DNA sequence: CCCAAGGTTGACCGGCGAGTCAAGAATGCC
DNA sequence: GGCATTCTTGACTCGCCGGTCAACCTTGGG
């Protein structure tokens, strides 16, 4: 009667691998480190994975489709400036929270990919993520310029890169935290900085009127009770 | 009579090393690749450097003090709002151009450090550079809030991270270019975005008055002829 | 206890790349 | 050309680490 395989071995190995990869990246991580941390032999590793790279791939693959889905946002075109401003800011805010939440939930894998840096399989995912964000941001921006929501003197390529760079830093800060920070507050600070930097004077007037009439604009919902520390 | 040592060997080796390290980072670069590219033997490498790491260090060390100097900026305190706004924007703009120029001149070494990612000796320099920029930015921001130039509802830590993240992306774009881009135009876009995002209403009025009287404010010097492409 | 089936192990193999050093090459004087 | 001095070379050594596999271990049935 055959011996029963240890049902926890693969789980322990995946956990250990995720942890070791996050510390050292793929190239500098040793299979022996992973197996020691998982509490199994080196040979047992190869019962579950074809190679070290395969282990890395198994961890990453389940992550890829989620990443792509996260970035797909429907485009909405409005004809009215009031509608445009409000809709635009709402959409931006919702999208922010969605992405930051995703990054927080998958912070271990982000750390894995970031620790490896150049030359790591799937390291291009970070660059792709960044490029995709910049591309989406630029698309939104061109629309907003066309709708007279954003100033028409902005270079959408440069500014899209600046904004996605800013969010990139925010994500890096987020995933480096041991405890979950106030994502909504962070998002508000970013949104406030960029909308003020981008809006036309007309669009700002629309927004200001919304505020003074007590309407549910994003800035009216800002945490007034929060003071900088 | 002893044979004369080849005076160009070390120069060729340093050049080749810089180039190979920029492509592959430290860990994935092979001494054999460097020596082949330099056109000397593998043994000759060790006549000039104790080890591969030593070669890397020799390239980086000359770079370190320049990097630190580049970030030291004198703090100037003004008492008058008009003076503050103008002085502040001028200083920001000058500092931008100085840093971007430095990054362009040292783009090969930046590429070297970026290509390695985590685990590379001196890779912390990039993190330190980023942290230093954020720290300096935050210091400036606190001053500007105190002088009623910036809004007092900004979280200076979060916003400083956002801004330095944005410049980080700009630098990465800059050093990835084969030909020198229009640094002043890029800097203008960033400055325009962030000043509009940060200034108090009073400070904006000061700035607008300056513009309408034809004074030499930064925005009055903006490249009006430039349209987005 | 013996047995068959399958699981697990860690000493071992072999490729790779950093570093070594004795042999060969280059130089200019006599 | 011979010689002494120094430079340069590239085959070689050695250690690291991913991956292998025969020996040993575990399991439950008879």
Image (cartoon, coloured by chain):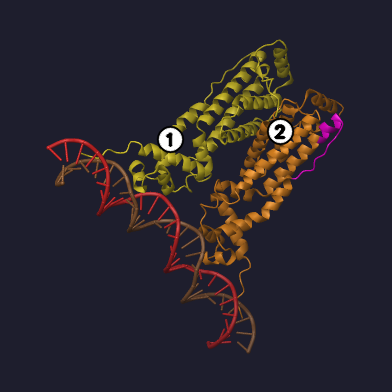
Chain colours: A yellow, B orange, C brown, D red
Q: What element carries label 2?
A: helix
Q: Neighbour class for label 2 at 10 Å: few (<14), some, many (≥20)?
A: some
Checking the image for residue A61, the label placed there is 1
Residue identified by numbered label 2: B189
* Looking at the image, residue A200 lies above or below residue B121: above
- Closer to the camera, A222 or C16? A222
At horizontal 70% and vertical 18% (from top left) the residue drawn is A203
Please provide percent x and percent y for residue B105: 69, 49
* Chain for disc number 2: B
Q: Please indicate, yes or no, whether residue A37 appears anywhere in the rendered image.
A: yes
**Marks 2 and 1 in Cβ contact (< 8 Å):** no
Q: Which quarter of the figure is the C terminus of chain B placed in?
A: top right
- Closer to the camera, A218 or A77? A218
In reply to whether residue B22 is colored magenta, the answer given is no
Q: Give the range drawn in magenta.
A: B72-87
Q: Which quarter of the figure is the N terminus of chain B placed in?
A: bottom right
Please provide percent x and percent y for residue B178: 62, 45
Q: Please indicate, yes or no, whether residue B222 appears anywhere in the rendered image.
A: no
At horizontal 55% and vertical 46% (from top left) the residue drawn is B118
Q: Distance between the residues labelled 2 and 1?
A: 38 Å
Q: Quadrant of residue A136?
A: top right
At horizontal 47% and vertical 45% (from top left) the residue drawn is A26
Q: Neighbour class for label 1 at 10 Å: few (<14), some, many (≥20)?
A: few
Give the number of callouts: 2
């Amino acid at each position: 009667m055959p011996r029963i395989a240890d049902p926890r071995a693969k789980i322990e190995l995946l956990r250990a691998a995720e942890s070791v990869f996050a510390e050292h990246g793929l190239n500098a991580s040793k299979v022996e480190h992973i197996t020691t941390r998982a509490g199994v032999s080196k040979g047992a590793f190869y019962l579950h994975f074809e190679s070290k790279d395969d282990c890395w791939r198994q961890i990453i693959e389940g992550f890829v489709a989620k990443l792509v889905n996260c970035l797909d946002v429907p485009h909405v075109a409005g004809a009215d400036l009031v509608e445009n401003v409000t809709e635009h800011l709402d959409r931006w805010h919702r999208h922010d929270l969605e992405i930051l939440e995703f990054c927080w939930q998958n912070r271990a894998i982000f750390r894995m990919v970031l620790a490896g840096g150049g030359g790591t399989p799937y390291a291009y995912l970070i660059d792709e993520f960044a490029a995709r964000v910049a591309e989406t941001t630029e698309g939104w921006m061109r629309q907003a310029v066309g709708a007279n929501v954003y100033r028409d003197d902005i270079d959408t390529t440069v500014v899209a890169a600046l904004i996605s760079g800013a969010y990139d830093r925010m994500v890096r800060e987020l995933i480096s935290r041991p405890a979950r920070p106030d994502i909504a507050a962070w998002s508000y600070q970013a949104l406030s900085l960029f909308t003020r930097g981008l809006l036309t004077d007309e669009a700002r007037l629309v927004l200001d009127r919304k505020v003074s009439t007590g309407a549910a604009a994003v800035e009216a919902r800002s945490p007034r009770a929060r003071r900088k520390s």
